[in-house]
Amino acid sequence: MSQSYMPKINHKISSNMPYLLTFVLILAALVRIVFYFEINTGPFISQHDWDQSDMNYFDQWAKNIVEGDWLTEHNFHPLHRWHRMIVIADDYFQANPDLAQKYVFAAGGGTTSAEPARLLWNHWYGEKTFHQEPLYERESRGQYLLLCLYFPFKPAE
């Protein structure tokens, strides 16, 4: 057993390297092709079309960049249904009527539209802030996290 098998294995591998490399590349290509067709049969290939997904936000952002807004000069943050639920359905504006007046007035009146909620979320996000950056590290430290935790665990009335 003192004889090592490693030199024999190394010799076989090095002498067949082109075949092994070709095999690995073909296998990798086949795996990618199979996954491509699997993804096309499910909902994942068009997930960017759903307006409540992050992929939709990134798709819109990419379209804005293609249209010439390379530096994202305007506030562009997602406003998903859960954002509106925290701001409007969770009575945030009712609990803070001074803020409600400010954002409803800035939105042009009417609390039924999503625009006051969008303006408030843009304020919470801050100017030109990447939307997945943790908001609780900003000046309103903890407010975003508390709001997100308040909704699922709000006290019974």
Image (cartoon, grey):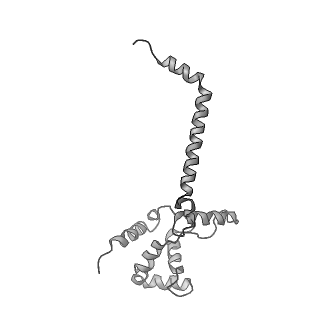
Quadrant of the image for the N terminus?
top left
Residue 71 lies, with reference to residue 15, above or below; the image says: below
Instruction: For the C terminus, give its image quadrant.
Output: bottom left
Residue 80 visible here = yes
Residue occupying the point 52% across, 59% down: 42
Residue extending furthest toward the right: 68
Q: Is residue 120 left or right of residue 73?
A: left
Residue 110 percent location from the top left of the image: 52, 87
Residue appearing at x 42%, y 66% in the figure? 141
* Point 46% across, 67% down: residue: 139
Q: Nearer the viewer, residue 98 or 13?
A: 13
Q: Residue furthest top?
A: 2
Residue located farthest toward the left when viewing the structure as drawn: 156
Residue 136 placement (x, y as % from top left): 44, 64
Count numbered badges in the picture.
Answer: 0
Residue 33 percent location from the top left of the image: 59, 47
Looking at the image, can residue 130 be seen? no
Using residue 149 as the reference point, say whether residue 7 is left or right of it: right
Residue 108 in the image, given as x and y percentages of width and height: 57, 86
Residue depicted at x 45% and y 84%: 98
Q: Which quadrant of the structure image shows residue 4?
A: top left
Task: Report the front residue among 46 and 110.
Answer: 46
